[in-house]
Image: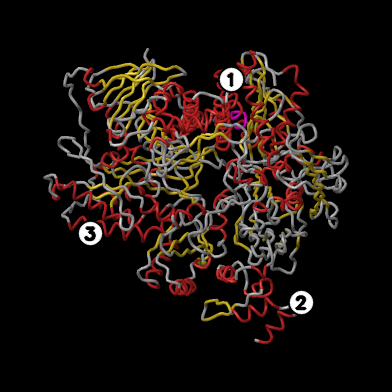
């Protein structure tokens, strides 16, 4: 490559590049900490459903502190919308809001992006941005995520890119619009204030960095960091066998057509250092809100690629350039406006799972069975004392898929989802609800040489009339096992469990009327198993039984390990275990036969 | 330390991992050898990692756990989320293994509601049955964490009585005593860790107490360092061992607080850089910042502790160039073996120490008082082969670049605890210690725009000095959610009064009269509905005007820490805290008088050292020969037995009355 003398002087040295990288990491970390600490809602502060990034003047991500990997796709798309609409009139002290999934790239309307331009020496040098989930942004149901939404118009207030501040001062108009639309306006506006504070902090720090090294050198360094991220991924891909790999996964349903699983299909083509993911074979766009837009699809692919290649990689838009993605317009992964999108997570999990299923075998150390996906429950109501609206929003994990090297974790978030569980003592202190049980579900982990993680049971007593919504997955189609491992147990949501009028809601459901005194129970899915369960070390099966993870019955049936109770202690019956494990497994009744013999 | 003269004697002995109290006794023997008698020992202060190590190596006691019926998921689910950063992409990420396996967990039929009322009474018959089951399994210690026990401790207390009857001799840790604070998982995890360590620490402390008694050290003033930077008695530590787990780096901060007092410099950034890591902490107005939560290997501890930020940056931190031409510094370290290349113990990869040697900052022959000779050629070769040649730079340029990168990482760590929380670094002095701190201090001062640096007389053993400089400190907490605009001022004062009474009672039992006790009330406050609290000291509360002051202070602190506040929002109390200090008689460190020696006697000569890409003739001083009142300017290097200090061109140094080096930018 030939460079002019001036550009050579501005090319960052290896030392400068690393200093700039370390500084960027520090800045996004600082922004992130500020956001977590300053957010008002339990969603940001307890569940930490928010993330921050720095983008260049073209809207490419320079650095992101990874809390929510999906925002890697959302940040550039939201910033592009700002540039498109305001490109010729962006000034120092401006701030923009956007949450419209079609206009920008927000996964759904509650994910509000706050974007501020950074100026140095009078020139636009980049943007500081954060995206944080809002408890309620209006629409027909508390929490704004209706599983029965038919259009984005049912999904809360849609803000295209709007200018929120000029000269560091708020217009106030947008605040008034939000206030008139949200059920919890104080929390939403409080969170936006926190996001603004974090963006302004990022601007100051970014400008300090530019001051130190100069705009031109920094700009080249940012590009170089992106190029290196891309090169790292390509170098690993180049080491894989060339080929075409396909896989499919199904999402339970779209919340509207309840008996119609949604197909997610990938054809991964790997040639040299290039890998492309073609999702054209996926289902048509859905009537209910299972659709996701291409920025999210790309981010989901990035999540899977980073997980398979280098979890420690420096996150920037360079990662997105390292692979190609195709989707079919009019499909569930490339829907046409105004198709609803609010319950995007089950589809995203299916994308991650389908990529692991297709190419996981290329990376044996990181291959894994499917996990529980993710889910949230939302209870909205008005407090009897003040009449003020509240939204109780909880994100509950389940079992992780087993690896080729060990059991899956129990009661955890998986894939791109990573919210903390809300403490019971906080929930009960703040909301009219009582938790009756919180435990792991025995036998919910898929059987395998390595067992899938266990799902969770969380049972509630509702203490005031309220409205209930759920966005879950894998209540119908379980987490698949891998390499001969069994599937995990499916999840469930039960109203009035243990009573004759017990009702199962669909995994995606909005606005169920919860009455005061009503009990409901959420059961979350277990992870899939890895490898043949008959290859599992009987001692591990014994430990699982002792620890209440596996029942003795399941030990015999799924694992072929016979345990006997000797004075309150389980012990392995080796001869019977050998017999069970050597039997013909196509004969379903053989375990029963052995049981009868005893 | 001699209480009358302020003189200190330092002995260093090898550790005895099988029974750490043996090494302590060896040290005590050495110390008593010098004409001092055991009876003269009035204070015995001890810092121990026995608990920390047992936790890191999971070699604690066989521990059981009792939880409210139906809530067996709390412990294993923990926070549910994986840590931020790469773990979210890492399918191989593992949660820490529970210290109590599910088979040693039992459920207690009982339930307390969120207002402290009892929903389900304790089923004692069922409890006894569960306990008999646990007894058969041979548990040594039991953690008890029932929902809302911080509001209504009755059930946990009754459970303890029944355990005493059913499993005599079993140690018991109640969550309502260890940390009566809202958020069940964090309370539970802290209580479990305590139960897990308690028998180990109790045995260790018992044995140490006995050994000390055998050599005649009979004083009741025997203390152990806590994570909060204070001391606690042997007895109290045996019961609450979890409070020692993060005490390791606390000593340095405590010693820094003493320096703040003696020098009158109230605002300090402590900078403890050793072989593998760098610990930084902030002291404002002479008070260290305290965090209310921390983690050890992913396990959560809710205990007041010194708020220390650690970054992988030490003398042994390795540099390398990866396949993509990126110069990476850290996080890996060469460790003690093989160590930096220049130690000549087989290390060939370049470390920070090697770079500092190449740059002329470290002495070849005067390292550790001449006990160890550094190999300049090996350091150069390591930097050349691994960094300079692959990147096409010259060796000094590469060495300087590596040091700049590690400096930036440490600067980010300092920003995270200072500017990020609303502090202006121009008001702060850096207090560098540890083997490598003073080498990098001048650069930190310059890059962060600090007021200057105070380099203590013995940076290498500074942390240990914290032991003889700290007071006894107990923390009390009680969660009680109350809106500030709905609570009666008398309710606040009555909660504090109760807590203060308990604190004074405990300290009196440890031999502190009321006039030797300081009580500092604090409140954990938040805007109603927020999920994160700020801890603020509060004065006496008797009128509603006092509540307004609290509200105003909270708004101001929120604005300062987070850059915004919400004056119209209701403020909520989450927890009441009392920090109770029992004053150990103050020991003044020795002040020195100027002996009037000429600074020329401290000059060892000059050598070439590199600063900002230029080789400079640099004056070398011998620290031990510097006298009070001496002044000199950089570029300079000050060598001493346990440490080396680098003064940049444009910086000046003054030796103060304590023989601290006061480094500032030359005006």
Q: Which mark is residue A588?
A: 2
Q: Is residue B252 left or right of residue A73?
A: left
Q: Nearer the viewer, residue A385 or B138?
A: B138
User: Compared to B388, does A473 lie above or below?
Assistant: below
Q: Give the left or right position of residue B531, taking residue A472 as reference.
A: left
Secondary structure under the numbered disc 2 in the rendered image: loop
Q: Which chain is indicated by disc 3? A: B
Q: Position of residue B449 (x, y in %)?
A: 44, 21
A196 falls in the magenta region:
yes
Residue at left offset 75%, top offset 27%:
A80
- Residue nearer the viewer, A536 or A286: A536
Same subunit, tags 1 and 2: yes
Q: Which residue is farthest bottom?
A: A597
Look at the image and tell me in which quarter the N terminus of chain B lies: top left
Mark 1 — residue? A210
Question: What segment is highlighted magenta in the picture?
Answer: A194-198
Q: CA distance from mark 1 to mark 2?
A: 70 Å
Task: Work out which quarter of the rendered image holds the C terminus of chain B and state it.
Answer: top left
**Nearest to N terminus: mark 1 or mark 2:** 1
Residue B301's label in the rendered image is none
Single out the mark in the foreground, 3 or 1: 1
Residue A153 in the magenta stretch? The answer is no
Q: Which is more toward the observer, A495 or B599?
A: B599
Residue B159 placement, left or right of A43: left
Q: Is residue B54 above or below residue B378?
A: below
- What kind of secondary structure does the magenta stretch mostly adopt? helix
Subunit ID for the residue under disc 2: A
Q: Is residue A270 above or below residue A84?
A: below
The answer to whether residue A107 is above or below residue A432 is above
Label 3 belongs to which residue?
B210
């Amino acid at each position: 490559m030939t460079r002019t003398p001036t550009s050579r002087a501005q090319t960052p040295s290896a030392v400068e590049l690393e200093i700039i990288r370390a500084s960027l990491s520090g800045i996004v970390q600082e922004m992130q900490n500020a956001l977590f600490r300053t957010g008002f809602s339990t969603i940001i502060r307890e569940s930490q459903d928010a993330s921050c990034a720095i983008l260049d003047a073209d809207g490419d991500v320079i650095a992101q502190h990874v809390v929510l990997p999906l925002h890697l796709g959302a940040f550039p798309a939201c910033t592009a919308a700002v540039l498109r609409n305001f490109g010729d009139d962006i000034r120092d002290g401006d701030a923009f809001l956007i949450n419209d999934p079609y206009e920008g790239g927000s996964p759904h309307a509650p994910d509000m992006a706050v974007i501020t331009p950074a100026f140095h020496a009078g020139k636009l040098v980049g943007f500081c941005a954060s995206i944080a989930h809002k408890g309620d942004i209006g629409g027909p149901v508390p929490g704004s995520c209706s599983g029965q939404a038919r259009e984005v118009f049912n999904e809360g207030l849609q803000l295209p890119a709007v200018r929120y501040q000029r000269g560091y001062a708020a217009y106030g108009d947008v605040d008034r619009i939000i206030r008139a639309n949200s059920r919890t306006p104080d929390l939403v506006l409080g969170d936006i204030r926190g996001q603004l504070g974090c963006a302004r902090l990022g601007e100051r720090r970014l400008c300090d960095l530019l001051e130190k090294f100069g705009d031109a050198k920094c700009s080249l360094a940012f590009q170089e960091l992106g190029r290196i991220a891309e090169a790292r991924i390509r170098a690993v891909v180049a080491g894989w066998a060339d080929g075409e790999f396909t896989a499919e996964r199904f999402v339970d349903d779209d919340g509207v057509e309840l008996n119609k699983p949604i197909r997610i299909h990938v054809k991964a083509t790997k040639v040299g250092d290039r890998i492309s993911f073609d999702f054209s074979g996926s289902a048509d766009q859905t009537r209910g809100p299972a659709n996701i837009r291409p920025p999210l699809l790309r981010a989901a692919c990035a999540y899977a690629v980073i997980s398979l290649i280098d979890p420690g990689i420096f996150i920037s838009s360079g990662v997105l350039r390292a692979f190609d993605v195709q989707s079919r317009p009019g499909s569930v992964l490339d829907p046409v406006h105004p198709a609803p999108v609010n319950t995007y997570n089950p589809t995203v999990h299916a994308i991650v799972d389908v990529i692991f299923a297709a190419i996981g075998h290329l990376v044996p150390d990181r291959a894994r069975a499917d996990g529980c996906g993710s889910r949230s429950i939302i209870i909205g109501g008005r407090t009897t004392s003040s009449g003020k609206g509240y939204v109780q929003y909880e994100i509950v994990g389940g079992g992780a898929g087993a690896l080729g090297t060990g059991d899956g974790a129990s009661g955890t978030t998986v894939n791109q989802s990573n919210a903390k569980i809300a403490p019971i003592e906080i929930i009960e202190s703040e909301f009219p609800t009582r938790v009756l049980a919180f435990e792991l579900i025995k036998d919910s982990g898929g059987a395998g040489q390595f067992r899938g993680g266990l799902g969770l049971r969380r049972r509630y007593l509702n203490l005031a009339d309220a409205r209930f919504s759920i966005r879950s997955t894998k209540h119908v189609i379980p987490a698949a096992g891998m390499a001969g491992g069994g599937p995990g147990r499916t999840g469930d949501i039960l109203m009035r469990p243990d009573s004759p009028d017990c009702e199962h809601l669909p995994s995606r459901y909005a606005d169920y009327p919860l009455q005061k005194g009503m009990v409901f129970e959420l059961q979350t899915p277990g992870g899939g198993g890895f490898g043949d369960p008959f290859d599992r070390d009987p001692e591990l099966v014994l430990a699982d039984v002792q620890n209440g993870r596996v029942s003795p019955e399941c030990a015999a049936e799924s694992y072929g390990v016979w345990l006997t109770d000797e004075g309150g202690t389980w012990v392995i019956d080796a001869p019977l275990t050998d017999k069970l494990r050597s039997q013909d497994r196509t004969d379903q009744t053989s375990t029963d036969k052995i049981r009868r013999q005893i | 330390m001699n209480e009358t003269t302020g003189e200190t004697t330092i002995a260093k002995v090898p550790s005895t991992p099988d029974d750490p109290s043996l090494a302590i006794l060896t040290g005590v023997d050495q110390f008593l050898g010098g004409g001092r008698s055991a009876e003269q020992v009035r204070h015995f202060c001890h810092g121990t990692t026995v608990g920390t190590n047992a936790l890191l190596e999971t070699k604690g006691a066989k521990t059981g756990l009792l939880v409210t019926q139906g809530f067996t998921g709390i412990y294993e689910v923990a926070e549910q989320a994986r840590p931020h950063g790469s773990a979210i992409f890492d399918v191989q990420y593992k949660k820490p293994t529970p210290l109590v396996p599910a088979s040693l967990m039992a459920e207690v039929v009982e339930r307390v509601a969120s207002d402290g009322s009892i929903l389900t009474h304790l089923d004692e018959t069922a409890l006894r049955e569960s306990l008999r089951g646990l007894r058969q399994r041979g548990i040594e210690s039991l953690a008890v964490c029932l929902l809302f026990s911080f509001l209504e401790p009755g059930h946990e207390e009754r459970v303890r009585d029944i355990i005493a009857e059913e499993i005599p001799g079993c140690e018991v840790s109640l969550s309502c005593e260890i940390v009566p604070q809202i958020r069940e998982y964090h309370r539970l995890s802290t209580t479990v860790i305590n139960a897990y360590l308690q028998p180990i620490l109790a045995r260790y402390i018992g044995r140490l107490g006995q050994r000390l008694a055998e050599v005649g050290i009979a004083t009741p003033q025997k203390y152990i360092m806590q994570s909060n930077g204070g001391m606690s008695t042997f007895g109290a530590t045996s019961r609450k061992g979890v409070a020692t787990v993060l005490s390791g780096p606390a000593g340095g901060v405590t010693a820094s607080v003493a320096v703040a007092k003696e020098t009158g410099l109230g605002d300090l950034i402590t900078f403890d850089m050793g072989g593998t890591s760098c610990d930084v902490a902030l002291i404002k107005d002479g008070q260290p910042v305290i965090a209310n939560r921390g983690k050890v290997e992913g396990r959560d501890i809710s205990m007041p502790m010194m708020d220390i930020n650690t970054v992988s940056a030490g003398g042994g931190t390795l540099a390398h160039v990866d396949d993509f031409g990126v110069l990476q510094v850290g996080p890996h370290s060469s460790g003690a073996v093989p160590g930096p290349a220049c130690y000549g113990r087989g290390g060939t990869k370049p470390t920070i120490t090697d770079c500092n040697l190449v740059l002329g900052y470290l002495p070849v022959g005067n390292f550790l008082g001449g006990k160890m000779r550094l190999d300049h050629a090996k350091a150069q070769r390591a930097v050349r082969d691994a960094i300079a040649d692959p990147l096409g730079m010259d060796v000094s340029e590469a060495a300087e670049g590596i040091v700049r990168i590690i400096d930036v990482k440490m600067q980010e760590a300092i920003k995270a605890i200072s500017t990020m929380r609303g502090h202006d670094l121009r008001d702060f002095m850096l207090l560098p210690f540890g083997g490598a701190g003073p080498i990098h201090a001048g650069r930190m001062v310059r890059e962060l725009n600090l007021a200057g640096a105070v380099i203590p007389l013995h940076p290498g053993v500074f942390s240990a000095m914290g032991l003889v400089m700290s007071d006894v400190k107990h923390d009390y907490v009680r969660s009680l959610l109350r809106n500030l605009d709905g609570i009666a001022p008398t309710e606040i004062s009555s909660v504090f009064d109760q807590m203060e009474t308990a604190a004074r009672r405990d300290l009196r039992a440890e031999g502190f009269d009321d006039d030797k006790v300081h009580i500092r009330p604090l409140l954990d406050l938040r805007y109603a509905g927020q999920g994160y609290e700020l801890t603020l000291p509060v004065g006496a509360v008797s009128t509603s005007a006092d509540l307004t002051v609290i509200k105003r202070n909270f708004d101001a602190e929120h604005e300062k820490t987070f850059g915004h506040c919400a004056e119209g929002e209701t403020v909520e109390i989450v927890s009441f805290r009392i920090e109770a200090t029992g004053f150990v008689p103050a020991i003044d460190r020795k002040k020195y008088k100027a002996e009037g020696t000429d600074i020329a006697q401290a000059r060892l000569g000059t050598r070439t050292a590199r600063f900002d890409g230029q080789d400079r003739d640099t004056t070398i001083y011998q620290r031990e020969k510097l006298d009070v009142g001496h002044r000199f300017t950089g570029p300079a290097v000050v060598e001493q037995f346990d440490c080396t200090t680098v003064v940049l061109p444009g910086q000046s140094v003054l030796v103060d009355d304590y023989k601290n080096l006061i480094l500032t930018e030359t005006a």
